Image (spheres, rainbow, N blue to C red):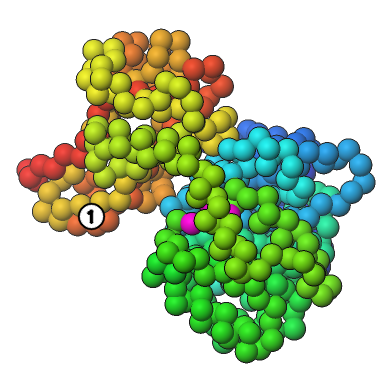
Amino acid sequence: MRWIPIILAMSAVVALAQAPSPTMPTTSLTGVLRGYAGGENNPQTTGFHKLVYEWTEAGKTRQMPFSVFLPHGYAQDNRRWPVLTFLAGLGDRGADPGMAMACGVPLEIGRSAELRQWMPMIVLTPQCSNEQVWEDPEMSQDILRLIDAVAGHFAVDRSRLYVTGFSNGGLGSWVLAADAPKVFAVTAPVVSREYQAEATAARLAGSGTTCLVISGMADSRSEPASQHMVTALRKRGADVVYSPVPAGQHFIWAAYYREQAFYEFLLMHRRGEPPPAGRLTGEQFAAMYAARQQSSADQLSFEHRLQRELDHLEPYWFVDNCAYTGGVGLAPELLGQKNVFITRPLNAEIPCRLQTTRQLAKDKWTRLNLTVGHPKGGEWELVMRINEQECGRITVNDETAPTGWFEYTLNLQSLAGKEARLQLVQQATGNPDPRAYWAKIKLVETNPR
């Protein structure tokens, strides 16, 4: 077995002596943009780039991993570009920005070549530490410093800054807008909980920030919370577009982040200017969801089929971001193993993931037994995460699994009696055949010795 430790190769080339804008935090800090895990630290080319923002505060060095998407045409002229900051949900926290890229806005950009080619703005995706949540008091200040650092380094139009997020990231969108009421042209929380409705409304009233609020009427996490926020905002005269989606559940955000019209709505708004005429209404956003559900029938059919086949191997696990291509799904027999589930990463940047959340027995020792494999000559990387904390990284190839199979046991004894969120992440390594074979994914309980 070859065990690969987590390494952040951080060669500093680009130092940013920050001079914060008047609407940003006024603490004087010196920040550095570094390439994540040995990556480029001064990217100028189209596409996704993983970075780390590092700064010193009160004598302590702090870091925030993030990814940045640079649009087609970037650095080819003197244009300044709008910036959309995207905040992921709690399950995508950690210290690897690739995890936060596997959902929401960056996922849909990575999934759709058409959307990627069209996208006319920079997309910034900071990653929340697994020890924090977006509403923690220091988090919004850290993100605002990151935005200021990015705006000082890349060609950014500061009058066209937007923020969106889903679930806990939606809550973070409220927090950011409330903490910096004159920074964002639009805040667009999706299926968010309530955040200090009266105080937030008081801060956003007259700020020039438009609030696009999308919620699911069948989602107890976002309703009536979103209605409370909207009522308080409208009472103060804030600019609000509210779209409660009939029968919408919690996981409705993909329907919006896949739609060019969602981003066009943002781009119509510029800080300091009145709300634009002709923008989409809340009713039109609700209709967008229904239309997307219909047009995505083939993709949904593929995802449902894939989930049913994973259930056949091991129920209560969920798969996402598997490439929509031939050769994935359940194979009756493969390399001497029965019922092998085959997956492929969505692309080079966005991994496929198998996930589950379990309440572990208090009086038992639990372990996760894995048997994983690869096609001859193929290669992929298995990243194991528990409660958003990376606990192991293994390359599966001809060297580590010469028979085609690799067995591993993950000890969960320390989590006895606790909830465990488990993620098995399949990342591409650049090999032309990155398929993963899953023959066993089994949680086993034993009595303590």
Residue 362 pos. (x, y %): 15, 56
Please state, as top left, top right, bottom left or bottom right, where the N terminus lies in the image: top left
Q: Which residues are magenta?
A: 252-256
Kind of residue at disc 1: Gln
Please state, as top left, top right, bottom left or bottom right, where the C terminus lies in the image: top left
Per the image, is 10 magenta? no
Task: Place residue 320 in its image quadrant.
Answer: top left
Q: Residue at x 42, y 35 (%)?
A: 302
Residue 90 pos. (x, y %): 45, 57
Within 10 Å of disc 1 (Cα), the crowding (few <14, some 14-19, many 20+) is: few
Closer-to-camera residue (105/212): 212
Residue 430 pos. (x, y %): 56, 22
Closer-to-camera residue (217/220): 217
Can residue 334 be seen in the rendering of this structure? yes
Residue 192 pos. (x, y %): 50, 68
Task: Place residue 312 in its image quadrant.
Answer: top left
Q: Residue at x 57, y 60 (%)?
A: 287
Q: Residue at x 24, y 24 (%)?
A: 339
Closer-to-camera residue (172/271): 271
The residue to which callout 1 is attached is 359
- Residue 449's place in the image compared with 175, above or below, is above
Considering every residue shown, the one lying at the far bottom of the view is: 235
